[in-house]
Image (spheres, rainbow, N blue to C red):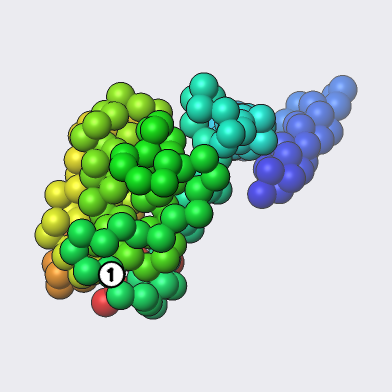
């Protein structure tokens, strides 16, 4: 499209130059039309340039995030945030929204399985990072009730930790996977309210929409999915929102 407007601009310039050859002044109407075409082409080129600049800024932001993730090390708690890849993947629309694990939750009071190097043999994990990893292990093992408790414990004990928004978000995922949609909505909205600049905001908006849809409230569900697309159009959550909207009737 950029090329099309560029060619139109060149065409208008050529016509204007030709019409303005010595001895053959162009009619006033033709000249006004050509100048209008040039002005329109210039406006469109300026708009496309702004869009390209916006896309480049988004790309630079994603590249910087990837560099930070590559530089981070889970073994160093002093880092601001372990790689997001350490978290379970975000469930997508349809059947993929439910975690792949199907194992039943352990009986109340039974600790979830954990294979975390350095984790104490008993008692509470020594560090916030160890508690977070323990919660992830429980989630991946399908022990959703235990994982939910551990994620909530992390959030309550360490609300200012860089991983606090992650922990709160994954508590909501545990509730969503167990079809406790009203509770999940409350938790996802807490992510939005408590950590409005956090990295889990797009996913929390997305799963809030999914939760409303699961309750049969299509109007509110669409609202949240459209909000994801408006605010985070180039994110994975934005792509999932567009995909779900395309099949809602």
Q: Is residue 188 left or right of residue 58?
A: left
Work out which quarter of the rendered image holds the C terminus and state it.
bottom left
Residue 25: percent from left, percent from top: 76, 26
In percent of the image, x 66 and y 30: which residue is there? 71
Residue 48: percent from left, percent from top: 60, 36
Residue 14 appears in which quarter of the rendering? top right
Q: Nearer the viewer, residue 243 or 88?
A: 88
Residue 125 in view: yes
Question: In the figure, 234 relative to 71: above or below?
Answer: below
Residue 182 appears in which quarter of the rendering? bottom left
Question: In the figure, 8 relative to 29: above or below?
Answer: below
Question: In the figure, 107 relative to 37: above or below?
Answer: below
In percent of the image, x 73 and y 39: which residue is there? 6
User: Which class describes the residues within 10 Å of circle 1: few (<14), some (14-19), or many (20+)?
Assistant: some
In percent of the image, x 20 and y 59: which residue is there? 109
In percent of the image, x 87 and y 22: which residue is there? 22
Q: Is residue 169 left or right of residue 27?
A: left
Q: Is residue 56 left or right of residue 138?
A: right
Residue 94 in view: no
Disc 1 designates what residue?
A: 105
Q: Nearer the viewer, residue 173 or 137?
A: 137
Residue 19: percent from left, percent from top: 79, 33
Q: Secondary structure at mark 1?
A: loop
Q: Nearer the viewer, residue 103 or 170?
A: 103
């Amino acid at each position: 499209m950029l090329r099309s407007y560029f060619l139109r601009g060149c065409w208008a310039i050529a016509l204007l130059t030709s019409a303005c050859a010595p001895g053959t002044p162009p009619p006033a109407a033709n000249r006004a039309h050509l100048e209008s075409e040039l002005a329109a082409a210039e406006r469109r080129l300026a708009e496309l340039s702004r869009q390209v600049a916006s896309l480049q800024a988004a790309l630079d932001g994603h590249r910087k995030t990837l560099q930070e993730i590559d530089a981070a090390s889970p073994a160093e708690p002093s880092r601001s945030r372990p790689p997001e890849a350490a978290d379970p993947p975000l469930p997508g629309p349809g059947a993929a929204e439910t975690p792949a694990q199907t194992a039943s939750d352990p009986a109340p009071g039974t600790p979830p399985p954990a294979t975390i190097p350095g984790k104490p043999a008993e008692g509470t994990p020594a560090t916030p990072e160890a508690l977070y990893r323990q919660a992830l292990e429980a989630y991946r093992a399908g022990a959703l009730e235990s994982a939910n408790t551990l994620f909530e414990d992390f959030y309550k004990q360490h609300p200012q930790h860089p991983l606090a928004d992650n922990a709160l978000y994954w508590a909501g995922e545990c509730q969503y996977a167990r079809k406790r949609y009203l509770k999940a909505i409350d938790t996802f909205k807490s992510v939005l309210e408590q950590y409005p600049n956090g990295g889990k905001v797009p996913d929390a908006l997305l799963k809030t929409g999914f939760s409303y849809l699961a309750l049969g409230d299509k109007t509110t569900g669409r609202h949240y999915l459209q909000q994801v697309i408006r605010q985070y159009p180039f994110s994975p959550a934005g792509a999932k929102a567009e995909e779900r909207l395309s099949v809602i009737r």
